[in-house]
Amino acid sequence: MKKLFSSQDAFELQAVRSELDALSIPYMVKNEFASGAIGELPWQDSQQEVWLVDDTWYTRASKVVEALIGRTSDKADIQSDWRCQQCGEENGGAFELCWQCHAGTRPE
Ligand SMILES: [Zn+2]
């Protein structure tokens, strides 16, 4: 078992879960019904966690999360960081072109 992702944002959680379902990646959700539970610490109340049942999926599943959460932050008009496909450099969301090689462009 390996923890893949946690969020208080139901939209993000749902997006990740449906993608994992689509890829037939086995996972389980912890704290799914923890909201308002007695005896939980307050910060845990609405924080749900997605755990991979099989660790061998971790690399693939974490790429899924990365792609999805990047997409959800675009919705809020905040450009997320992106990785240049030409040289692999990490670029800030404000850059349209890769600052290092000037060849890569920010993916839509
Ligand atoms: Zn580059």
Image: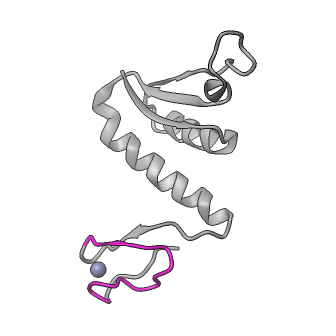
Extreme residue in the left direction? 87
Extreme residue in the bottom direction? 102
**16 over 32 or under it: above or below:** below
Quadrant of the image containing the N terminus: top left
**46 over 13 or under it: above or below:** above
> Mainly helix, strand or loop, the magenta region?
loop
User: Which image quadrant for residue 36?
Assistant: top right
**81 over 64 or under it: above or below:** below
- Residue 8 x/y as whole percent: 64, 38
Specify whether residue 105 is painted magenta.
no
Relative horizontal placement of residue 81, taking residue 43 as reference (left or right): left
Relative horizontal placement of residue 72, taking residue 58 as reference (left or right): right
- Residue 91 x/y as whole percent: 38, 74
Write down the region rendered in magenta: 88-102
What residue is drawn where x is 68% and y is 64%? 76
User: Which image quadrant for residue 2?
Assistant: top left
- Residue 31 x/y as whole percent: 60, 20
Specify whether residue 91 is painted magenta.
yes
- Number of numbered discs on residues: 0
Extreme residue in the right direction? 36
What residue is drawn where x is 27% and y is 77%? 86
Which residue is nearer to you in this view: 39 or 32? 39
- Residue 68 x/y as whole percent: 53, 52
Please tell me in which quarter of the rendered image ligand 1 is found.
bottom left
What residue is drawn where x is 67% and y is 25%? 42
**95 over 54 or under it: above or below:** below
User: Which image quadrant for residue 100?
Assistant: bottom left
Give the colour scheme of this rendering: one colour
